[in-house]
C-alpha cells in the first residue's frame, strides 16, 4: 500500500438532497482523520443540481452519476 492509497471508502447515496449532502461533505472534509480515505457519492439521477454541486465544490470527491434513479439497494 502506498501513502496515497485510502484505507477506507465512504460511500454516499443521494437523490435531490443538495443541502443535506453539502452539510455531510463539509463535516467529513472539515475534520482531520488519522487515515487516508476516499469519498464516493452516487447520485441517483437528481435533476436539481446535486451532482453539479459536488463536481464544482468538491472535485476531490468521486462522483458516480446513475442514468436513472435506482433507489436504495
Image: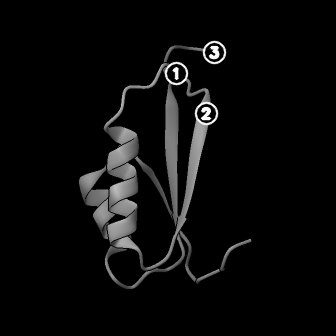
Q: Nearer the viewer, mark 3 or mark 2?
A: 2
Earlier along the polypeptide chain: callout 3 or callout 2? 3
At 55% from the left and 79% from the top, the residue drawn is 67
What number is the disc on residue 1?
3
Q: Nearer the viewer, mark 1 or mark 3?
A: 1
Q: Give the answer, above or below, for where 62 lies relative to 52.
A: above
Residue 17 location, quadrant: bottom left
Where residue 20 appears, as percent x and y from the top left, is 39, 66
At 58% from the left and 52% from the top, the residue drawn is 11
Residue 52 location, quadrant: bottom left
Q: Are marks 2 and 1 in contact (CB under 8 Å)?
A: yes
> What is the CA distance from the residue labelled 2 to the residue labelled 1?
8 Å
Numbered disc 2: secondary structure? strand
Earlier along the polypeptide chain: callout 2 or callout 1? 2
> What is the CA distance from the residue labelled 3 to the residue labelled 2?
13 Å
Residue holding disc 2: 8
55 relative to 46 in the view: left or right: left
Depth order, front residue of 18/64? 18
> What is the CA distance from the residue labelled 1 to the residue labelled 3?
12 Å
At 56% from the left and 14% from the top, the residue drawn is 2
What number is the disc on residue 35?
1
Where residue 59 appears, as percent x and y from the top left, is 32, 48
At label 2, counting other C-alpha atoms closer than 10 Å, the crowd grade (few under 14, some 14-19, many 20 or more) is few
Most extreme residue toward the right is 73
At label 1, counting other C-alpha atoms closer than 10 Å, the crowd grade (few under 14, some 14-19, many 20 or more) is few
At label 3, counting other C-alpha atoms closer than 10 Å, the crowd grade (few under 14, some 14-19, many 20 or more) is few
Numbered disc 3: secondary structure? loop
At 52% from the left and 21% from the top, the residue drawn is 35
Quarter the N terminus occupies: top right
Q: Give the answer, above or below, for where 24 lies relative to 31.
A: below
Q: Are marks 1 and 3 in contact (CB under 8 Å)?
A: no
Numbered disc 1: secondary structure? loop
Amino acid at each position: 500500500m502506498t501513502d496515497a492509497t485510502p484505507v477506507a471508502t465512504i460511500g454516499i447515496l443521494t437523490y435531490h438532497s443538495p443541502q443535506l449532502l453539502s452539510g455531510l461533505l463539509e463535516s467529513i472534509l472539515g475534520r482531520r482523520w488519522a487515515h487516508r480515505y476516499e469519498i464516493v457519492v452516487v447520485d441517483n439521477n437528481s435533476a436539481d443540481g446535486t451532482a453539479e454541486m459536488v463536481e464544482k465544490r468538491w472535485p476531490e470527491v468521486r462522483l458516480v452519476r446513475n442514468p436513472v434513479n435506482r433507489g436504495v439497494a
